[in-house]
């Protein structure tokens, strides 16, 4: 009886070793599990995404900083018969981002009105070189 028990255990050990080796064996290129052939979509790697090219032309937004002692009650940026305004007053030492309409050129005019009655104007401001507009006393 020991002979049958030993032979049975040997067969189980052999079957386990063969299945473990088969599971670790590398797959042959062009073959798939179950005998199905690999499709071209799964055989080729996905192409790498190209980096976005640098944006050319004027920016879509500028940052406005009020470095003066007074609150700016209105800020208007205009060019090419298009305008962009700051929707709320800009407090002293405050900053805000103003979204611009699509522009072809880089030159805009900027007008700011302050609560003390003061006014700041810039007829030719290049937003392609400077994306920061600072109002000072």
Image (tube, rainbow, N blue to C red):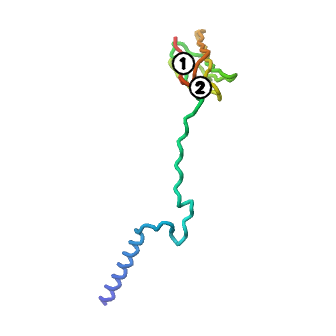
Q: Relative to 94, is 80 on the left or the right?
A: right
The residue singled out by tag 2 in the image is 98
Counting from the top left corner in percent of width and height, residue 55 is at: 57, 34
Counting from the top left corner in percent of width and height, residue 111 is at: 62, 16
Q: Relative to 78, is 28 on the left or the right?
A: left
Which residue lies at the image location 62% right of the left edge and 15% below the top edge?
Answer: 123
Element class at badge 1: loop
Relative to 55, say whether 132 is above or below. above
Disc number lying in front (2 or 1): 2
Q: Relative to 93, is 88 on the left or the right?
A: right
Relative to 8, say whether 43 is above or below. above
Of the residues under marks 2 and 1, which one precedes in the sequence?
1
Mark 1 crowdedness (10 Å alpha carbons): few <14, some 14-19, many ≥20 = some
Which residue lies at the image location 55% right of the left edge and 68% below the top edge?
Answer: 37
Q: Residue furthest left?
A: 2
Counting from the top left corner in percent of width and height, residue 42 is at: 54, 60
Q: Residue furthest right?
A: 81
In the picture, the disc for residue 53 is none
Q: How many labels does the image show?
A: 2
The residue singled out by tag 1 in the image is 91
């Amino acid at each position: 009886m020991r002979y049958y028990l030993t032979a049975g255990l040997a067969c189980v050990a052999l079957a386990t070793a063969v299945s473990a080796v088969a599971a670790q064996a590398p797959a042959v290129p062009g073959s798939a599990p179950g005998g199905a052939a690999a499709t071209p979509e799964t055989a080729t790697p996905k192409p790498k995404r190209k980096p976005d090219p640098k944006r050319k032309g004027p920016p879509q937004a500028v940052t406005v900083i009020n470095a003066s002692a007074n609150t700016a009650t209105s800020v208007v940026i205009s060019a090419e018969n298009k305008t962009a305004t700051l929707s709320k007053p800009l407090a002293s030492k405050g900053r805000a981002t103003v979204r611009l309409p699509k522009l072809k050129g880089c030159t805009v005019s900027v007008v700011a009105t302050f609560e003390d009655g003061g006014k700041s104007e810039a007829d030719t401001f290049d937003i392609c070189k400077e994306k920061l507009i600072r109002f000072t006393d």
